[in-house]
Amino acid sequence: MQVLVCVKRVPASGGTPQLTDDGVRVDTRNLAFTVGPHEECAVEEAISLVATHGGAVTVLSVGPAEAEEQLRYAISMGADRGVLVDSGADELDPQATASALTAAIRQLESEGGPFDLIMFGNESPDAGNYQVGIRVACALGRAIVGGVKGITIDDDAGTATLHRGVADGVEAYEVTLPAAVAVKEGLNLPRYPSMRGRLRARKAELAEFRARIGTPGTPDTEGGPGAGEPVELVVHRGGLRKLRLRRPAETQSETVLLGHGSEAAPAVVDILEELDVV
Amino acid sequence: MLVLVELDEHGVAPGSLEALAWAHPIARELGEPLHAAVFASGTIPPAAPGDPLVDLSLRAELARHEVSTVHTITHPELADYSPERWGESLAQLIAGLRPTAVVAAGTERGTETMAQAAARADLPLAVNCTELERSGAPGAEGPDGPDGRSWRLARIRQGGMLLEDAELTAPIAIVTLAPGAAESTAAPNAAAEPADVPEMQSDVPAVAVERFEPEFGDRFVASRLVGRTTRDGGVSLATARVVVSGGRGVGSADGFGPLEELAKLTGGAVGCSRVVTNNGWRPHSDQVGQTGTKVNPDLYIACGISGATQHWVGCMSSKAILAINTDPDAPMVKRATYAVIGDVADIVPAVVDEIHRRAQ
Ligand SMILES: Cc1cc2nc3c(=O)[nH]c(=O)nc-3n(C[C@H](O)[C@H](O)[C@H](O)COP(=O)(O)OP(=O)(O)OC[C@H]3O[C@@H](n4cnc5c(N)ncnc54)[C@H](O)[C@@H]3O)c2cc1C
């Protein structure tokens, strides 16, 4: 089966995000980058699905040229090829991201046939728009289930069963392939890249498209890939525009130190008794 | 203004009560009536044929929120939840009604349905909003403008670490409300209305009911709900009053033994950090944080958890936090209500012993 995984380059930091002076974005000068945990699980799942059912894994990213790093990471885990849609340094709105991904997928499918399964992370860890996968699936006319933490493929029936956790249990959905899925961390434990994987990733050729903000009504792809130039995809801006970021107000209060080591146990139990839970 | 109302066995689901309370003043500011949309499948049995929504207590509840009209969406194919069918139904309802704005709770289902509807209607969607207002001079950009009206909104990013101020330009604003961002109160000037349902039986609440039946083409593509298992018993992490949570400092899967015991003694649930799930010490369903569960217990006990922001956003709604950590400078210790400095392997068993000792 042919599996496509869509990934986004995001800053990785466990601390409080620092903002640029104009407050428009997170100051990433001292940060490393990664793909979100949901997407890392998507890559892992794609690799193991292909190991079982045959086929190949393609990873696709819309983002700055540096997103190459995340594509190579996915290849080092075991993905077969990477495709970059260079959309410049500024983050696109969710409709524009979806339109860029859709255009790229149409282009890839016109060359290599349909992807049986297109995988997304449920939401990106930074923008968290919860909609890109759904928009792409709708544009392509495919079913999509979100929040998925379990995937089984039935080759003979040409279907996938998708499990997701809900407040009071688990739901199972069946989709006819080709279809799409938005997954969550917990789907699997992503592997660490092997030494051989890293070497392969370093040498891998990436396919590249370029995104150009266009006006509605123009075709999604323009110009041939002639003269070594990347194919240009025309992307449409959506109606949501980020103005600035700010930190939510935090109510800072002094921490009450109950003590050191096991001697603090009575003070802890006092609190539990106050709450009436013991 | 239209609110997508989710139902549970008690009536309007908690998130949708928040969405109604949040939407009400916005609708009033705009001078527009508040409509609700409900999927009439499953939860409400149609008592009489032809009357899609006869549940009086639900009508009374919606009336208390000054909902003037409720649109009940019914179709044989909607007996079970389906992301595509729900989204398509809502998109068709919106296309007919042309509301100024559509609001839903930022629950998993609410978000998924709104994203499906927005994609199908080719409209922008802003999720997890905390504020929404019309911007620009009134009437300056009417609904017939090329891109529609413009709105200013605030929404949460990075699981709650940051807020984003954004501008939304759309003929119809489609937004979801961040969970917990609004108080679920009845509309203030309707609060005096009697809540007693039986008494109202002769006097049916003044909510107009309109049935809406969507159309699905023969070749409509949708995922099919084929199974549902409900978790039996146990305290759920999301609703526990006490969460005993462990991080790297717990050291191993076995290290969670005393934490489990403390959770049992307090009627609580066990949680953990991402390091713990990545190490395979606990299942991912125990993970608290941005990519795990968001918890809001009365007491969150963070054992050997540093308090990285991605973890913090999952536990910051707790009423009180007790940090147990060897490092007095750990962010979790700095932000906690209470702290005990030292080794979890000493402290948690001592707390368990102390509970047993007092019980005697
Ligand atoms: C996009 C993204 C999403 C993420 N989502 C989540 C998420 O949902 N949930 C989550 O938890 N993390 C998440 N993370 C990871 C997060 O950034 C941290 O790496 C993680 O929370 C750290 O876990 P920890 O506190 O257990 O480990 P550490 O940060 O290593 O902290 C261990 C703590 O234990 C203390 N300690 C050590 N030994 C002892 C001892 N014997 N007794 C007492 N204390 C001791 C140390 O002082 C330290 O404070 C995410 C990261 C990214 C990039």
Image (cartoon, rainbow, N blue to C red):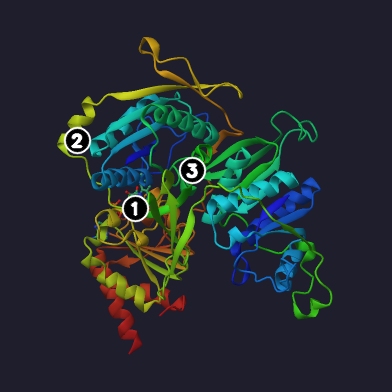
Q: Amino acid at mark 3?
A: Arg
Q: Amino acid at mark 1?
A: Asp
Q: As displayed, is residue A204 above or below residue A15?
A: above
Vertical placement of residue B271 versus B351, above or below: above
Q: CA distance from mark 3 to mark 1?
A: 17 Å
Q: Which mark is residue B230?
A: none
Q: Residue at x 29, y 31 (%)?
A: A81
Q: Percent position (x, y) of residue B155?
A: 57, 44
Q: What chain letter is assigned to the residue under label 1?
A: A
**In the image, which is nearer the foreground, mark 2 or mark 3?**
3
* Residue B43 placement (x, y as % from top left): 61, 68
- Element class at badge 1: strand
Label 1 residue near ligand 1, CB within 8 Å = no
> Which of pointers 2 and 1 lies earlier in the amino acid sequence?
1
First of labels 2, 3 by sequence position: 3
Using the rendered view, name the quadrant where residue A257 is placed: bottom left
The residue tagged 3 is A142
**Does any atom of ligand 1 lie closer than 8 Å to the CB of label 2?**
no
Mark 2, secondary structure of its residue: helix
Q: Are marks 3 and 1 on the same chain?
A: yes
Left or right, residue A211 beside residue B353: right
In the picture, the disc for residue A197 is: 2
Which of discs 3 and 1 lies nearer the camera? The answer is 1
> At label 2, which amino acid type do we have?
Gly
- Residue corresponding to mark 1: A154
The 10 Å Cα crowd at callout 2, few under 14, some 14 to 19, many 20 or more, is some
Would you say residue B292 is visible in this rendering?
A: no
Q: Earlier in the sequence, mark 3 or mark 1?
A: 3
Toward the top, the furthest residue is A227
How crowded is the residue under tag 1: few (<14 C-alpha within 10 Å), some, or many (20+)? few
